[in-house]
Image (cartoon, helix red, strand yellow):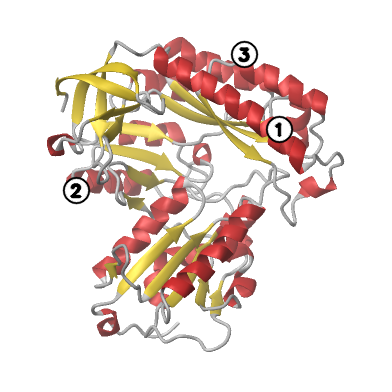
Amino acid sequence: MQMIDKSVFKDKKAVYYTLGCKLNFSETATIERQLQEAGIRTAKRGETADICIINSCAVTQEAEKKCRQAIHKLVRQNPGAFVVVTGCYAQLSAEKLSKELGVDVVLGIDKKGNVLDYLGNLAKHEDAGEWFAQPSKDIRNFVHSCSRGDRTRYFLKVQDGCDYFCTYCTIPFARGRSRNPRIEELVEKARMAAGEGGKEIVITGVNIGDFGKSTGESFLSLVKELDKVEGISRYRISSIEPNLLTDEIIEYVASSRAFMPHFHIPLQAGSDEVLKLMHRRYDTSLFAHKISKVREVMPDAFIGVDVIVGARGESDELFEKAYGFIKDLEISQLHVFSYSERPGTQALKIDGAVSPAEKHRRSQLLIGLSEEKRLAFYERHIGREAVVLFEKPRPGMPMGGFTDNYIRVECAPNKDFVNRLVRVRLDGFNEEKSALLAGGIIGYAD
């Protein structure tokens, strides 16, 4: 790491490429803001960048492949650019990535919040780049992130790392152990977002229900304090483990001022046998109870569910059992992933590998089931009134936004609606059936 001479950043342009989860996108937006504050402009479409930032993912083999492809593409499109790679893949394979053609610096997870410090004078490395990544077990720092990017919603990172060590997952090795800042720090971040005009915040992290391990606090206490922040009209809880989604949290959300009736709950496998092989900390009975509890107190809540198909040990019979269990759940949408072999994971010791063709077949079956459930959920809201927070439309595209229970709604572009809560009547589907149409504008709700 060299001493920073910010004069070298004058008139420099940067391009950003992100793979993986919402948390990664939030962290990239934070990096972008830091570089902008140092005088580095974000490159416009068609411009050649002086700096390339790649925020990587390691959740699947395909994600790692896409990272390497992105590096090669950006190096080709931006000749002579200073290339920085960070993120989970960078943490796990820092030295390897430093040898990729054109890469100058590789930063582990603990350095992600200090990218600016590693840009030096932007001098290219002739051979292999430098790499900076300490063992994940030694990572203790929490890198804050509360960013909007180019959308209306803010993403507030409240927790990082994971102590669960599920047999299929590399995230604890990439992100380190569970850690979090104090509630008062996060409340201040939310107030800053409100001061910038933010209306909605998505609470993100690796295992957010585990919040409080570092500080002796609890996720429920965090939710209650965030609910008090004036100016924020909506909060959404991103993925939360079913065993950590307590009935108290569900009940509080149902009666809260600003927490939306929207949950994302990872199931991963729909049979107790496979859940046990995965070392998940719940069974199908507990998961079904959580869905039932949400429906009891929030009948119209949107419930998204993660499922992995083709994990080792998932026989044809166990998949059929899982399919039946999932079909009977009163959920709104599935996020379906094919199991990916990850080096160093305990899953590799499990017998019963599933062929790629069979993984694809199972994936397609669940994707079809997901679409059935989503369309049914949308359809039962047709004709109702709802409040939509609209986002800035892309050129030539309809204006879009989401209801409190995460139904996507479209209407003709109207600049007055951007980042406004607008009450509308929900009409039928758009042509692609990806959204409902705002058939009538009733008025503002903010």
**Amino acid type of disc 2?**
Glu
**184 in relation to 246, above or below:** below
Q: Nearer the viewer, residue 427 or 302?
A: 427
- Residue 330 at x, y percent in the picture: 54, 15
Q: Which residue is mark 2?
A: 196
The disc at residue 361 is: 1
Q: Which residue is mark 3?
A: 328
- Residue 202 at x, y percent in the picture: 37, 39
Task: Tell me if mark 1 has few (under 14), some (14-19) or many (20+) residues whose alpha carbon lies within 10 angstroms of its own.
Answer: some
Find the distance from the CA under tag 3 to the CA under tag 2. Answer: 43 Å
Q: Residue at x 46, y 19 (%)?
A: 375
**106 in relation to 266, above or below:** below
Asked which secondary structure carries label 2, the reply is loop
Residue 227 visible within the image: no
Work out which quarter of the rendered image holds the N terminus and state it.
bottom left
Residue 26 visible within the image: yes
Q: Residue at x 58, y 65 (%)?
A: 68
The disc, 3 or 2, on the residue closer to the chain's N-terminal end is: 2
Q: Can you tell which of label 3 and label 2 is closer to the viewer?
A: 3
Q: Can you tell which of label 1 and label 3 is closer to the viewer?
A: 1
Find the distance from the CA under tag 1 to the CA under tag 2. Answer: 46 Å
Asked which secondary structure carries label 3, the reply is helix
- Residue 133 at x, y percent in the picture: 57, 70
**Amino acid type of disc 3?**
Asp
The disc, 1 or 3, on the residue closer to the chain's N-terminal end is: 3
Asked which secondary structure carries label 1, the reply is helix
Find the distance from the CA under tag 1 to the CA under tag 3. Answer: 20 Å
Q: Residue at x 19, y 36 (%)?
A: 413
Work out which quarter of the rendered image holds the C terminus and state it.
top left
